[in-house]
Image: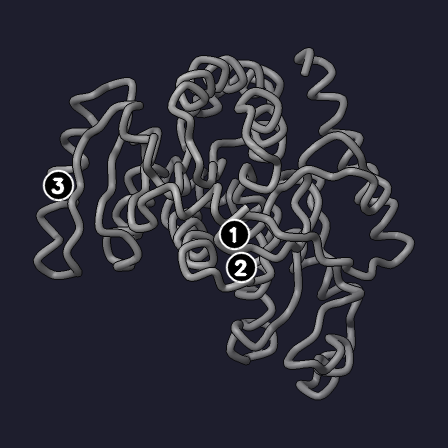
Amino acid sequence: MKEENFDCVNGRKVVIIGCGFVGAATAFSLMQSGLFSEMALIDANHAKAEGEALDISHGVPFAKPVKIYAGDYDDITDASIVILTAGANQKEGETRLDLVHKNIEIFKSILPQIKQQNFKGILLIVANPVDILTTVAVKLSGLPENRVFGSGTVLDTARLKFELGNHLNVDPRSVHAFIIGEHGDSEIAAWSSANVSGIPLNRFCEMRGFFQHDEATQKIAADVKNSAYEIINKKKATYFGIAMAVKRICEAIVRDEKSILPVSSMMHGQYHVDGLALSMPAVVGRDGVETLVPLALSETEQRELEKSAAVLKDILKDNNI
């Protein structure tokens, strides 16, 4: 697999498809990271891609050398990672299914062009709804499943750690917990495996003077799930958080870190889920998703996960996927 993948590509080259808020913020975050020496931006509006490339390039003297330019699909051929952020935004009065249908149609126009390039790198899906679109990308791209995955609940998990860190007044990097399932309204906080530096969450809470566990966890889970809505209500879109989440995923790939991240990848019977992409902890490295991590779930969490998967399957079925 390694010979087929990174040995055939430029490991320091990334392509971002879609130069909206998320795509542009991701490009800016990656420019600052120093992970790549070449970055091509692709957008249906080529002038927009040119403008973003020029604007971000002006910050290169404050960062590390990187060539940033507006490109086209030919630039995909030797890229190590293609990040797909292109998609329509949900408008007032539209249903979720309306958004799904529009973005599936956008993917149907983009993925064949990626497929034509004999692309050997990683295809990272960031557009929403990410689990649905990752499933679509796996089926339409023709790429091996380990090399097609979504940003999943990496950002949701960061939000959970942030909220828990604030609640307990500890460094959120010392909090170990996952949001799993759909990146969306049916997401699940996996409380049964949550801990702070190896200490079970409830025990650590009591060390810090908190004893109303059910009340606290319900509020934190709701705050995490609703945080995107709150941000959108206040500033119309979310993009900085997801841009940093994408940077974190790219770090794991480029550095072959074997990091455990809750990305969206195809399920084949794991957790009693089959035939669709779902956000669950996985080992991520230079070849993409190496293996899923067998997270121990409570009976309630397992039932909620299966319900989350059923929601996604119904949407896929309604869209003939």
On the image, the x and y values in percent for residue 109 come to: 44, 13
Few, some or many C-alpha atoms within 10 Å of disc 2 (few <14, some 14-19, many ≥20)?
Answer: many
- Kind of residue indicated by mark 2: Ala
Residue contact between numbered discs 3 and 2, judged by CB atoms under 8 Å: no
Q: Which residue is mark 3?
A: 55
149, 1: nearer the viewer: 1
On the image, the x and y values in percent for residue 74 come to: 28, 24
301, 60: nearer the viewer: 60
At a point 40% along the width and 55% down the height, the residue shown is 254
On the image, the x and y values in percent for residue 249 come to: 47, 53
Q: Which residue is mark 2?
A: 158
Real-space Cα distance between discs 2 and 1? Answer: 5 Å
Question: Does residue 97 appear left or right of residue 126 in this picture?
Answer: right
Residue contact between numbered discs 2 and 1, judged by CB atoms under 8 Å: yes
Quadrant of residue 152 within the rendered picture:
top right
Quadrant of residue 194 within the rendered picture:
bottom right
Real-space Cα distance between discs 3 and 1? Answer: 26 Å
- Kind of residue indicated by mark 1: Leu
Quarter of the image with the C terminus is: top right
**Circle count:** 3
Disc number at residue 155?
Answer: 1
Quadrant of residue 190 within the rendered picture:
bottom right
